[in-house]
Image (cartoon, helix red, strand yellow):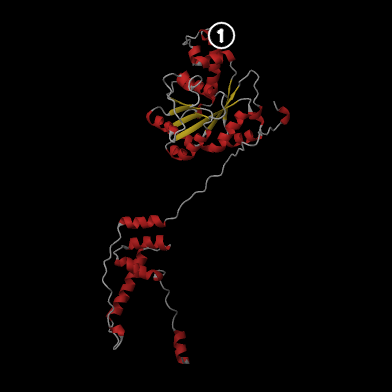
């Protein structure tokens, strides 16, 4: 690469910070395809991925990427390229998870609470004789 | 008093069924009389499976006291049955050797019972015999803070001293942790005590001349019984917070 190209690259602003939802883009897309609400998606991200995020954040993330995806889909394909052929996704039947299934998933993933046994406040060894504090007063 | 005790709706008062022959049934009989005298409704239960007749709670209160076999898996659940259907106090006299069964029941049932507002008092009777003290401490080791403790110093002879109860290191530790209430049951003349036990007659029945037993109709017997009962009732009065819901 010649110096002019390097100079151009160096002059460009740093790339925009990606959303923290980016690693979960495919999951979110699949959940939306199943018909889950944004609130349900937030719950699943919190309970299954330990990710705290607001409902609007997820909504905006999906909307932005949907727009971009649509924009890419409308661009004319390159001549002679395999990419010109539209990808087809095989049709599949997707069932929306019921409220029960969502609840069961939440129960499965909640942490198991196991309180340790309370320590004894008083311990008596019945194999040891009683120890008089004042041996001279023994009856 | 713990916050649970302040809001308790029901109480089970049970004798610590450890060492035999220390006077548990005498105490429980006296306590039953105290409840009666104060018109406090209470269910009496006889959990002494070894003591079939004389000297058992059933013998003193004929017809009023069910006999419960605690050596079945749900034997002690009877506390709960009677609290469900009867007065808010159960007075249960354990037999000796009931420790393991009772401790296991507490391990299994204390938490749900206490959530229902049920509190427990365990009455331990000590004499001059160190074995009676060890029995109380063994129960405390297992029951811990799940019961309120009431200890009765039983004067089994005229010059009883409670050296092992009052001056041993292990007892001091128990007292420090659990702050038991301690009362005294005064010495009783042996012939009177034997007659009461033999005929299944309570101090109240003697004091109120309600018995047909000749030796218990004598004035000296009546006045003795009155004195014993009054002193015992005074003691119970001092610790009534552990005897009521």
Q: Is residue B52 above or below residue B218?
A: below
Residue B201, percent from left and from top: 49, 15
The answer to whether residue A83 shows anywhere in this view is yes
Mark 1 closeness class: few <14, some 14–19, many ≥20 residues within 10 Å:
few
Q: Secondary structure at mark 1?
A: helix
Q: Quadrant of residue A83?
A: bottom left
The answer to whether residue B9 shows anywhere in this view is no
Q: Residue at x 36, y 68 (%)?
A: A27
Q: Residue at x 53, y 13 (%)?
A: B195
Q: Quadrant of residue B180?
A: top right
Provide the residue designation for mark 1. Answer: B220
Q: Is residue A105 left or right of residue B132?
A: left
* Front-lying residue, B26 or B36: B26
Q: Is residue A66 left or right of residue B242?
A: left
Q: Is residue A20 above or below residue B134?
A: below
Residue A66, percent from left and from top: 31, 73
């Amino acid at each position: 690469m010649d110096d002019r190209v390097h100079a151009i690259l160096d002059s460009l602003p740093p790339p925009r910070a990606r959303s923290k939802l980016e690693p979960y883009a495919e999951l979110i897309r699949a959940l939306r395809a199943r018909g889950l609400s944004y609130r349900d998606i937030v719950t699943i991200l919190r309970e299954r991925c330990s990710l705290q995020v607001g409902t609007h954040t997820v909504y905006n993330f999906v909307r932005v990427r949907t727009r971009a995806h649509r924009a890419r889909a409308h661009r004319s394909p390159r001549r002679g390229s395999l990419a010109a052929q539209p990808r087809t996704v095989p049709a599949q039947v997707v069932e929306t998870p019921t409220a029960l299934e969502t609840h069961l998933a939440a129960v499965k993933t909640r942490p198991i609470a196991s309180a340790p046994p309370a320590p004894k406040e008083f311990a008596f060894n019945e194999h040891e004789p009683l120890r008089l504090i004042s041996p001279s007063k023994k009856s | 008093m713990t916050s649970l005790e302040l809001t308790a709706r029901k109480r089970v008062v049970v004798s610590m069924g450890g060492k035999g022959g220390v006077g548990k049934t005498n105490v429980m009989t006296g306590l039953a009389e105290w409840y009666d005298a104060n018109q406090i409704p209470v269910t009496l239960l006889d959990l002494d499976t070894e003591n079939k007749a004389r000297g058992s709670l059933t013998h003193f209160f004929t017809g009023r006291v069910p006999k419960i076999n605690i050596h079945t898996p749900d034997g002690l659940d009877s506390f709960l049955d009677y609290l469900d259907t009867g007065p808010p106090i159960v007075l249960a006299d354990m037999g000796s050797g009931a420790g393991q069964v009772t401790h296991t029941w507490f391990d299994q049932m204390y938490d749900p019972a206490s959530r229902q507002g049920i509190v427990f008092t365990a009455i331990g009777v000590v004499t001059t015999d160190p074995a009676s003290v060890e029995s109380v401490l063994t129960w405390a080791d297992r029951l811990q803070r799940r019961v309120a403790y009431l200890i009765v110093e039983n004067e089994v002879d005229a010059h009883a001293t409670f050296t092992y109860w009052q001056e041993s290191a292990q007892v001091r530790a128990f007292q420090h942790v659990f702050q038991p209430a301690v009362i005294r049951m005064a010495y009783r003349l042996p012939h009177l005590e034997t007659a009461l036990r033999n005929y299944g007659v309570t101090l109240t029945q003697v004091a109120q001349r309600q018995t047909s037993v000749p030796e218990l109709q004598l004035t000296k017997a009546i006045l003795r019984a009155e004195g014993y009962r009054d002193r015992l009732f005074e003691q119970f009065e001092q610790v009534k917070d552990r005897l009521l819901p």
